[in-house]
Image: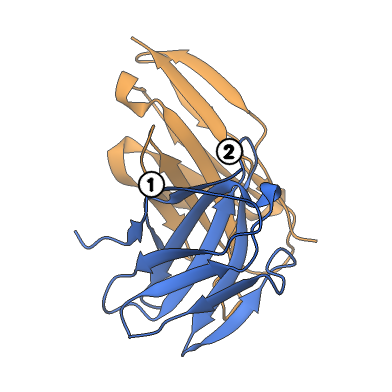
């Protein structure tokens, strides 16, 4: 069965540190990839998405992610985090062949940024 | 920016009672979804809805669950007879077409006591 793994469950960083959150998926076909963020008390917001083309995608708030097909990975990065980046981050995968758009989510990574 | 609206934000219900969770998707969106997140667990797909019918549902979405788009604007999730294990945050989402990302609502926290 399709699955998505996020390696880091809880990450604590100081402001200005660099961030990389890992995401791997298990589906061998074409995929669409997403990172969502959930700030405390708020809804899931789309950070960035990859459907095709340049495997390095840039999203909102200075985030980027790189799709490495050979590694089945879609890691999220930010060169310098801010206190306001404290949130939960979810990687999600949609099969490219899906006509329903079902997303499979990873278990989430809680990021805590210390001021 | 258009939003997906969910009501209520928090619902407490007794085991065995029926609940209806309401969602107003973005008006020009065509694909609608319900997901849930049990505390401390992954966000899980429940059901997708397109062209006035269910297009896919998960194993979780058993006979106790149903969805409806009664009037062209609301999209509801009904749980017929709630169980303790239905306690979760329920998210509604919509998208215009498959090449677009989802827009999620802020969720309804359902507590079954």
> Residue B86 at x, y = what percent?
64, 52
Q: Which chain is indicated by disc 2?
A: A
Q: Which residue is situated farthest in the left direction here? A: B1
- Front one among B59 and B99: B59
Provide residue B98's location: percent of width, then percent of height. 46, 76
Q: Colour of chain B?
A: blue
Number of marks in the image? 2
Q: Residue at x 71, y 63 (%)?
A: B60
Under circle 2, the secondary element is loop
Q: Which residue is mark 2?
A: A108
Q: Position of residue B1 (x, y in %)?
A: 19, 58
**In front of the other: label 2 or label 1?**
1
Other-residue count near label 2 (Cα within 10 Å), few / some / many at <14 / 14–19 / ≥20: many
Quadrant that contains the C terminus of chain A? top left
Q: Secondary structure at mark 1?
A: loop
Q: Which residue is mark 1?
A: A43
Which residue is depicted at the point 46% across and 19% down? Answer: A112
- Going from the N terminus, do you reach mark 2 or mark 1 first? 1
Q: Chain of mark 1?
A: A
Within 10 Å of the Cα at label 1, are there few (<14), some (14-19), or many (20+) other Cα atoms?
some
Which quadrant would the N terminus of chain A be assigned to in this image? bottom right
Question: How far apart are labels 2 and 1 at the CA level?
Answer: 14 Å
Q: Are marks 2 and 1 in contact (CB under 8 Å)?
A: no
Colour applied to chain A: orange
């Amino acid at each position: 069965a399709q699955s998505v793994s996020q390696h880091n469950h809880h990450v604590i960083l100081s402001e200005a540190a660099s961030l990389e959150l890992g995401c791997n998926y298990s589906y061998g076909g074409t995929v669409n990839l997403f990172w969502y963020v959930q700030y405390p008390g708020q809804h899931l917001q789309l950070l960035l998405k990859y459907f095709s083309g340049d495997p390095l995608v840039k999203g909102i708030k200075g985030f980027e992610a790189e799709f490495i097909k050979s590694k089945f990975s879609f890691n999220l990065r930010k060169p310098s985090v801010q206190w306001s980046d404290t949130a939960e981050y979810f990687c999600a995968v949609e099969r490219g062949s899906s006509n329903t758009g079902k997303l499979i989510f990873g278990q989430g990574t809680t990021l805590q940024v210390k001021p | 920016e258009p939003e997906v609206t969910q009501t209520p934000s928090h619902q407490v219900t007794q085991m065995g009672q029926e609940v209806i969770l309401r969602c107003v998707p973005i008006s020009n969106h065509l694909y609608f979804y319900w997901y849930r997140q049990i505390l401390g667990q992954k966000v899980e797909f429940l059901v997708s809805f397109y062209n006035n019918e269910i297009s896919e549902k998960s194993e979780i979405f058993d006979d106790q669950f149903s969805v409806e788009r009664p009037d062209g604007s609301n999209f509801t999730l009904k749980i017929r007879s709630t169980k303790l294990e239905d306690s979760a945050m329920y998210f509604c989402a919509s998208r215009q077409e498959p090449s677009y990302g989802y827009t999620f609502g802020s969720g309804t926290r359902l507590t079954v006591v």
